[in-house]
Image (cartoon, rainbow, N blue to C red):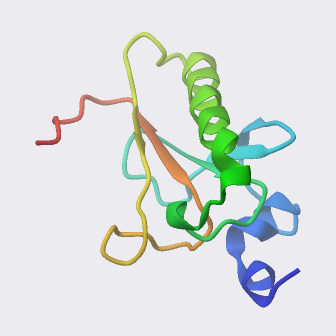
């Protein structure tokens, strides 16, 4: 395990070293409630594998993005927002607003969001 992984709060959640309110888990993905929500429903969807940013993904990780999106649909269904809709956001690096350097997607729901652009 690299030093970055040892210090990564999300890796500690994956390893169950830190508590979290898990809403979805499979062999490659973990999803849990954000401790500082910005929406009525705010879930973080992460790969269990430590990948710092979206741009750090390798070709071997290509299918992971699809699995994360499929997990988002399952989460939406389990939380009762599948038909109403949700937002899935990735912040990449400093200028993109990334705070935790472990690839993650914000699943936001429970209110109507303004369109982007």
Q: Position of residue 104 (x, y in %)?
A: 57, 56
In the picture as drawn, the residue positioned furthest to the left comes out as 117
**Would residue 17 appear left or right of 83 to someone viewing this image?**
right
- In which quarter of the view is residue 31 placed? top right
* Residue 4, image x, y percentages: 72, 84
Q: Nearer the viewer, residue 13 or 55?
A: 55
Q: Residue 84, how many percent across, how many down?
A: 37, 15
Residue at the top extreme, as displayed: 83
Question: Who's the residue at 48% across and 15% down the image?
Answer: 82
Q: Which residue is drawn at the image coordinates 87% and 69% (left, top)?
A: 17
Looking at the picture, how far across and down is residue 76, in whole percent? 54, 23
Work out whether 2 lies above or below 41: below
Q: Is residue 27 above or below residue 56?
A: above
Q: Residue furthest bottom?
A: 3
Taking 7 as reference, is 99 above or below it? above
Which of 38/68 is in front? 68
Please name the residue shown 25% across and 28% down the image: 112
């Amino acid at each position: 395990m690299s030093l970055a992984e040892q210090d990564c709060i999300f890796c500690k959640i994956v390893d169950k070293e830190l508590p979290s309110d898990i809403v979805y888990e499979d062999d490659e993905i973990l999803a849990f409630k954000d401790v500082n929500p910005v929406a009525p429903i705010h879930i973080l969807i992460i790969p269990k594998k430590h990948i710092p940013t979206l741009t750090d993904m390798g070709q071997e990780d290509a299918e992971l993005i699809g699995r994360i999106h499929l997990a988002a649909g399952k989460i939406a269904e389990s939380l009762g927002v599948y038909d109403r809709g949700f937002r899935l956001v990735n912040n990449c690096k400093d200028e993109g607003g990334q705070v935790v350097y472990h690839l993650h997607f914000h699943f936001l729901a429970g209110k109507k969001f303004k369109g982007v652009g």
